[in-house]
Image: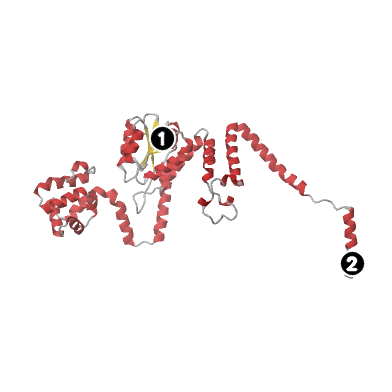
Amino acid sequence: MIHHPSAVTNPAEQAIAARIVAAMPTLTPIHRRMGEYVLANLFRAATMRIDELASAVGASVASANRFARALGFDGYPQFREALVRGFEATLAPVERLRSAQESRAAADDLVDASLEQAADNLQATRTSLDRATTDAAVDAIIAARRVFIVGFGASAFLAGLMEHGLLPYHDYVRSLAVSGGPSHAARHLVRSNDGDLLIGIAFPRYVEDTIELARRAAGRGARVLALTDSPRSPLAQFADLALYVRADRRLASNADSAVLAVIEALCDAVAYRAQRSVKAAADVSEFVLPWLFDPQSTPAGTADQPARALSKSARPKDGKARGMKAKVAEAKGTEARGPEAKGREASSLETKRTEAPLTKTSRTAPKAPTAAANSRTTRTTRTPHSKR
């Protein structure tokens, strides 16, 4: 079945597809089969050598070359060049990887170069972000009735980490990068309105689902916060707020380290400014305590056993677990009692620290020897000339 060129969104792809469709009535059967294959596999055809395309459709190399001339190109190399022109951004990581392998760079040089590039990305991002924009982003998260996070592809993992970081400090945070796919995400956004915030995460090569879902949420009145690479990003075109993160990477399309650093910074700022954040963090710590493993609190004889072998019921009975619970309860009580109580507790603690050494010294001071003890010592002392 022939694909209609209107289904292709890239202008360069549309031009090639239109040429093939226009030439179809005049092509020979074997050339028509080639045209159908290219229309169905534009990206794959752009990466193929002439012999690979010929083999894929069961034709000769000469037939593939004549197919290109039938479309108005001088030969197959010019035809493939036109195909690649629509996929520069997509094919760039592939070409960079091929160049690196051909240069035979040492593995340790590649590791150092990758780490250096990550540091450069982070420094460039830190320099470009202004305080007013980041503060506005934090305000938008705190003020939103509901926060939806959208990202697909590699950005889906970043969306999940952002949900994880914001959950303790916001009543409703949900990552829509779930197994149900974009249609499931759309169901959550169907009732979005001006009280909601959608955080979209999109970097080259931009996933269309992220852009479309964010656009639809904006159309329903939701505010959009974009985490993306530049003002040219399709996500930035309709976002209310945008934080631009440099994500250059030598041998892949994007680097996630600087993006994750910005996400963590936003989560920390929300935790600092949100109401009752200390109590929320304490509640989470207390609730997940049975699932936490502390090697120092492992009972004797079980050090070599895997963590899963230790029963959850045994962990809270341990002294360190009880101590952690006490600290959690103290954190809750301290926040509830307010700043004056915190000041009194700090003063009391300082007094105890000052008095503790004196008390310890008085308990352990050596007693003066009694008269009887002195007498026994005198009777048992021998002179140098005494016999044994």
Q: Please state the horizontal and vertical placement of residue 153, each as a whole percent of the image.
A: 34, 45
Q: CA distance from mark 2 to mark 1?
A: 92 Å
Task: Identify residue type, mark 2.
Answer: Thr
Q: Is residue 302 left or right of residue 129?
A: right
Q: Please state the horizontal and vertical placement of residue 62, each as a whole percent of the image.
A: 13, 59
Residue drawn where x is 41% and y is 37% of the image: 174
Q: Quadrant of residue 156?
A: top left
Residue drawn where x is 37% and y is 47% of the image: 247
Q: Is residue 63 above or below residue 24?
A: below
Q: Is residue 383 above or below residue 238?
A: below
Q: Please state the horizontal and vertical placement of residue 6, each as a whole percent of the image.
A: 19, 41
Residue drawn where x is 15% and y is 51% of the image: 33
Secondary element type, mark 2: loop
Secondary element type, mark 1: strand
Residue drawn where x is 46% and y is 38% of the image: 167
Q: Is residue 259 left or right of residue 21?
A: right
Image mark for residue 92: none
Read off the residue under disc 2: 383
Read off the residue under disc 1: 147
Q: Residue furthest left?
A: 26
Most foreground residue, 124 or 262: 262
Of labels 2 and 1, earlier in sequence is: 1
Residue 236 appearing in the image: no
Q: Quadrant of residue 289?
A: top right
Q: Is residue 280 above or below residue 76?
A: above
Q: Quadrant of the C terminus?
A: bottom right
